[in-house]
Image: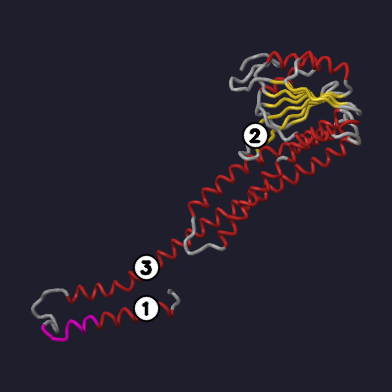
Amino acid sequence: MGASPGTLIADPSAKQSALNLTLISPDACEFINNASLDDVAAACEQWPLIWLDCVGLADIALIEEIGNIFSLHTLALEDVVNAGQRPKAEFFDDHAFFVLSMIDDAKSARYEQISFFFGENFVVTFQEREGDPFEPVRQRIRISNPSRLRHRKADYLAYALIDAVVDSYFPIVDATGDKVDAIENELLNAQPQPRPKEHIGELHGLRRATNLLKRTLWPLRDALTTLIRSDAAFISAETKVYLNDTLDHAIRLTETVESQRETMIGLIEMQLSLSQARTNEIIGVLTIVSAIFIPLTFLAGIWGMNFDHMPELKSAYGYPAALGFMALVAVALVVIFKRRKWL
């Protein structure tokens, strides 16, 4: 707060930084874990394409040195260390900057920011912590000829990595859809004893998760569109065709999430309606019972008054006659309620 533009300030909770270096040529590839800046500088001179992955954002000096090696813009680096950026694409003279959120742990649906820099012959990624969906890309790099990732430039590698991030959302979205379908089936085939509190709580939790997905995916479409429409010389027309496919995936994810959100809202409203209908049914039964007993209570009150000259007070058949009359009144009320379809 108050620092000059381009000043890098590490988050106190940021993880310690580590460098993973992937070196690529048409005929060979090499992976260096826990690489040093000397390894990076040497690779820039010897390999036609390199991918530097910085995991952890605590080491500001290291990040600044990476920026110096690849001539990365300081304002973009500032966005790297300030996690929580809205997905966006920005372009500079010889490189592009692309930032989005990714799921680094599918089981817990844990999100983190990942930032991409790419130019003519390099891709630099910055992750907040370990865990990413890039293993299929690494496997494709390891595969010998033919391999597009070995023969094409940095823009195609950047596309492959961005596409892996976007595709990693599909299992989460599909799992949410399965849960929603299961709740819907249970509600539509509800047993006499539904579980309204459990359903409502679960649906609200799913809706919160879906809202987070929507906030993450919606601006991603605009960022990808900006990337596709750019006239940067280091992004080829062929790569833009592949990026269009990634954009289609992002649009499909957004539409699916929005559909799930609307379904959950409908299910919540339906659950509330079912609960209200159940309450009304119970109140109706209690009202009918009360309506039957009101005249009986009235008769019992009349005959229970201890006056000396009450009719039939000393009759031998007075008690059974009173019970029989009250039973007749109760039966008559039940018949009347059934004819009126109140029961």
How packed mark 2 is, by other alpha carbons closer than 10 Å (few <14, some 14-19, many 20 or more), is some
| Residue 57 on image: x %, y % | 67, 21
Q: Is residue 39 visible?
A: yes
User: Is disc 1 in contact with disc 2, using a CB cutoff of under 8 Å?
Assistant: no
- Secondary structure of the residue carrying tag 3 is helix
Mark 3 = which residue?
287
Alpha carbon distance from label 3 to label 1: 12 Å
| Residue 12 on image: x %, y % | 59, 19
Q: Is residue 254 left or right of residue 237?
A: left
- Secondary structure of the residue carrying tag 1 is helix
Chain-order first, disc 3 or disc 1: 3
Quadrant of the frame with the C terminus: bottom left
Q: Residue at x 78, y 27 (%)?
A: 90
| Residue 303 on image: x %, y % | 18, 77
At label 1, the amino acid type is Val
Mark 2 = which residue?
111
At label 3, the amino acid type is Thr
Query: Bounds of the magenta span?
Result: 314-323
